[in-house]
Amino acid sequence: MSISREAYEALQSIVGSEWVSDDPAICIADTKGGYATGIVDINAVPPACSIQPGSAEEVQQIVKVANRYKLPYVPTSTFFTGMCAPSVENVIMMDLKRMAKFEINDKDLYAIIEPGISFSMLQAELFRRGLFTFVPTCGAHASVLANHIHCGDAPLAWRMGLGYRRILATEWVLPDGEMLKLGSRAYLKDYFWGEGPGPDLRALLRGNEGHEGGLGTVTKIAVKIFPFIPEKLEPQGVSPRTTLKLPESRMKWYNIAFPTREKAVDFMYEMGRCEIALMVSTIPPLFRYVARSRGLGASTFWEKWTRFGETANKDAMDVRVLIFGWTSEKQLAYEERVLMDVIADFDGVARPAPPFDESNFMSADAVCSWFIGGRFLSEVYFESLDCGLHTERGIREISRKRTPPLADTWDTPMLWAGYEFAHLGKQEYLNYADESELDALRVHEQDCREMDLKIGAYAIMEDTRMFGKAWYNYNQKMQELKNIFDPNNLSNPPKPLERPLHEKKS
Amino acid sequence: MTLKLEDLRHDASGCIRCSNCKFTEHIWMQSARFGRQCPISTRYAFNLYSAPGLMHSALGIMDKKLEFTPKLLDALFKCTLCGACDVRCKRNLDPEILSVIEVLKAKAVEVGKGPMPEHRVVTENIEKRNNRYGSPYDNRLKWLTDDIKPAAKADILYFVGCVASYAHNEIAQATARILMRINTDFMVSQDEWCCGYLLYSTGQVDSFSRQAEHNIEMLKKSGAKIVLVSCAEGYKTWKVDYPKVLGKSTDDMDLKVVHIVEYIDQLVKDDALRFKNSIPMKVTYHDPCNLGRLSEPWYHWEGTYKRYGVPEPPKTFRRDGHAGVYESPRDILKAIPGIELIEMERARDNAWCCGAGAGVELAFPDFALWAASERLEEAKATGAEAIVTCCPTCKEVLHKAAQSRREKIKVYDITEIILEAIS
């Protein structure tokens, strides 16, 4: 794999020799995306070179060189997901980490972000100013920009909504190298407004679950931020036992036990109707045992999990709720009274939980699901909480048939998270296998797809072509858009259309 | 060294590329400016210049899909082995990524691609004269002044180390005078050899083993029970790397290693020592990596990974930075009248490396100065008048950075402060 000397020198003239390299070690290090190693990145090939632009202008020039020499390019930043591992030959890997400027407008409540800023960086800066934002489920290490244009799935989305709804003005380098400015940035040097003047193309960024670099490169976005309470979240401890202590006058955790999944889901709907709490999510026993064993090693987890399985209650489901006195202490008291009423209506048993957090305001422990060894595949559905009941039941039955080699989940409930006051529900099912048994996960994945077709569910990272009328002509329209935006098919081909899992199966 | 690269395949392939290893612990992060943790990743940004890149390279080397290219050697030997990536990773996961980087360096040496030419000069100095500077061997105890009178026989052997013996005598002298003032008998040894930290951290394991064996034998002959050090590199080398190359656990070594800050802190806590003199100064404390997150005892483990990555036999101790020496120096500083200790944003297990570790200052002085300058910026942001540390190498590079930038901030070794407080 290589690109012509002429093309390489053209790239070098843009960023300087320090910030472009075709050294094989540099290229191999850019091959492997994270997440589901050996599954999502199975078709990854090393890029021909890696380049680190320092500005949007440099991105534009790089893209123009890519077009001149007909070289595909892949934009990436924190590189956690395998979606940006190159899957075609002779790719220019465009790593945007050096672009890490940000600006916070604490009067109009928005932040302007470049791709190299992680959520923890932004959140830390916001906390200093008495503001805050969500932190995604994948972790605080994720790029704020990349996550907002992908989906912005976050525990606090119960109240704050998904991140992709909060994109304001945007600067977007199109696949031909032209700069497209959306929202107020189109005419003003201001980022406060997302819609017009002119057509509002933000839906193209969001797509089904982001375009994954398939329609160009977003170099700057403004995102909405929120006022926080005056009290501080206090960091405590030394790694691996670090946590944020929450101010008890404004925040309170409850773990609520329900006799069945259905009762728990009905409770979540009612909580949404009452419009209280900052976060509402189930606590799968698997997650609870992972959290308990974090920092103690995989042996501890498997020992405890196996013991738990002998007596596990397969029907019971716990829900975790964070009530929040966002405006005042009185609001916390009000939310607590309402919560107690709703719990009683659905036969729940409430237990107050300690005032600490590692998962929602800074999401420091998001990747701990991997520590128990082996590999896992996560089936994620964004639809309704009710839909989650169907998909979870289906996957549970499939898993049972494939266990072993899949690790035993003891038929216990998996994750349901309510978003936007339960108008949207996420259901996630984790299946583990040993790293030597990845085929078992792939077969399991295929079984799940067949189940999806049967019940009409749609998992993220799934090939939308499978679903025919359920997705109307989504793929056809995306192909048309891709042809218009990227006639040379250079911007992270073949995104945003095909999914790595589908490619592997075929 | 007992470990070979192939022994660490499970660890190298366990990297999920989450990049937590590149950032300050999210819970403790206080600003974007000081939100990064890995010096090579912060400075060079390419994925290769980070733990995930090096993990993938290690797999490439194992699978013969990659050779030691110039960039790989550059990234590998610019890594200061500060261990920040390892601690960040182990907040959630289990791979021994620092071991992978150490063994990858050793592999580069084994195939004749490493270490860097500047390291080879030091190796030659150590092999010929048993110190990193190549000074005459007889000069090792030249730092002893007339007023310093070590005992002929004592339970404590003060292992001075090359930097304090040859370059920063003020640290050796302050340590010895402190011990004398508090009536602690100590020996020093003319037969002390370089601890070998530079050899181990540049992958020269065979040469390092020779140093380890000699120094352990020297200690045995002296009859001392405790090795007292004033150097973070020496501390970690005795406590962690000597047992590691001998295939033992720290607990199985017939010796005890104590840093001067641990010794003094215990005396203060036992009310056996009080600081008389006031030192009116705002200071900030720089945690040396080798005294902080890297100083946990070594537990030798040989085994295999069973299904789902369960180690067999089970691992009895997890080196994840929780048991580093963080509080002793802080408690000492807080106990000195007049001193106001202000923490930097990145402290304890989150400390930013000074940039000099693992021979990086020798081979890549500009990069080391850049890393030290980053630390100075962070120290300045606290409003402190001085940075205090517990490691001669940290002191040296921080001092150089301050000089090169004409900064007013002073840099002290903690022994200098302690001595002033008890004199």
Image: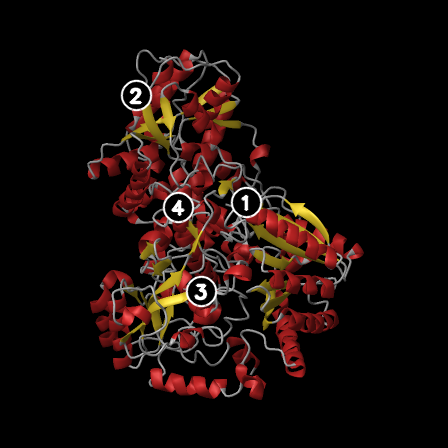
Q: Position of residue A181 (x, y in %)?
A: 29, 72
- Tags 3 and 1 on a common chain: yes
Residue that label 4 marks: A128
Q: Looking at the image, is mark 4 or mark 3 earlier in the sequence? A: 4
Q: Residue at x 57, y 57 (%)?
A: A279
Q: Nearer the viewer, residue B405 or B13?
A: B405
Residue B64 - label: none
Q: Residue at x 40, y 51 (%)?
A: A126
| Chain identity of mark 1 | A
Q: Note whether B167 is above or below A461 in the view shown.
A: above
Q: Residue at x 66, y 63 (%)?
A: A270
Residue that label 3 marks: A147
In-image side of B140 versus A284 (left or right): left
Residue type at mark 3: give it.
Answer: Asn
- Tags 2 and 1 on a common chain: no
Residue type at mark 2: give it.
Answer: Lys
Foreground: disc 1 or disc 4: 1
As helix, strand or loop, the secondary structure at mark 3 comes to helix
Disc 1 and disc 4 in contact, CB within 8 angstroms: no
